[in-house]
Image (spheres, rainbow, N blue to C red):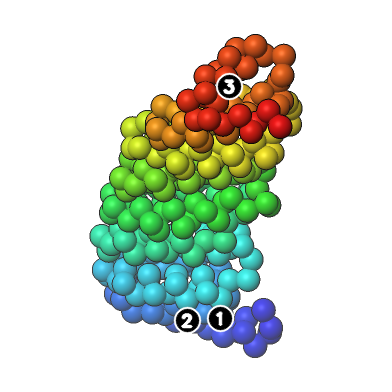
Amino acid sequence: LTVDVRRRVELLRRVLELLPTDDHAARFFHLRRVLQLEGGEPAVVEELKVEAEAAGLWPEMAALLTQLACQQTTPAGRLDLLRQLAWVLEKKLDSKVRALLALEGVLLSPEQHAEVIGEATRLARQTKRYEDLLALLDRLTTPEFELAKRKEIISQRAGICEKEIGDPARAFQELRRLLELDPSDWAPVAELERLAGEHNLWPQLDAAFAELADRAFSRRDRLDLLARREKIARERLGSRPRAFDLLVRRYRLDQADLDLLRLLTEDAEALQGWDWLL
């Protein structure tokens, strides 16, 4: 603070001492001037909360916190002020929706996100504003966050899409994101198969397996995925020609498998598809 500003703060503090202790509204507005001069000093913010409580000036306190958050230049400072704002909006002004929207303004970082996400999740469930929660969660899937955290968040998004929003196709797409993010981790495959079975998403599952096969690290994985796709084509999509085509591709990768050869012969006879021998 400059010498001039310090003198003005000192004068305002002296005047504050002269104000009646029970004139909380006057004390609030006086302290607000002190805060504006001192650049958002946290101790003054706490003093203001005391006066706001006594005077019922929580709307003014919310407006002040909003202003301070907009002026804050550091992510940590902005995080603290927006969390305080969310608390005021929820607890004192009974506006859970506005509290959730305030948390959306937080600049999340790998070091500072867990508590915010916890608060936002609770508010979203209470207000049923799951799209706002999904938007906030999606900001934790950027490369600056470690792989394990990104996978955890995408799994959480999938759960919200299925259970809270009731959109299994969207949940399916979130699980596909997990496979795209880490093709070596097949943990989402079981969930993809469950969703496909419960909601008839077999074409989407076939497409997911085709994409995963393009990124497969081993011949064994490619054979596994071709077998899964063949089963989908034959048993779920009712397409014997499609199943036959996938069976041919399996056989070309594993010509020592006599069972595959037998199945190929059966399909070739039924479909007159002997061209695969060429």
Q: Residue at x 36, y 60 (%)?
A: 99
Residue 33 numbered tag: 2
Q: Position of residue 147 (x, y in %)?
A: 66, 41
Of callouts 2 and 3, the N-terminal one: 2
Quote the CA–CA distance across marks 1 and 3.
Answer: 83 Å
The disc labelled 3 sits on which kind of residue? Answer: Leu
Question: What residue is disc 3 on?
Answer: 264
Element type where label 1 sits in the image: helix
Residue 191 at least partly seen: no
The CA distance from mark 1 to mark 2 is 6 Å
Residue assigned mark 1 = 37
Q: Where residue 211 appears, x then y in whole percent?
A: 61, 42
Q: Position of residue 59 (x, y in %)?
A: 31, 72
Upstream in sequence: badge 1 or badge 3: 1
Asked if labels 2 and 1 touch by Cβ distance under 8 angstroms, the answer is yes
Dot 2 amino acid type: Arg
Decide which of 249, 195 is in the foreground and name it: 249
Q: Residue at x 58, y 22 (%)?
A: 264
Of tags 1 and 3, the one toward the viewer is 3
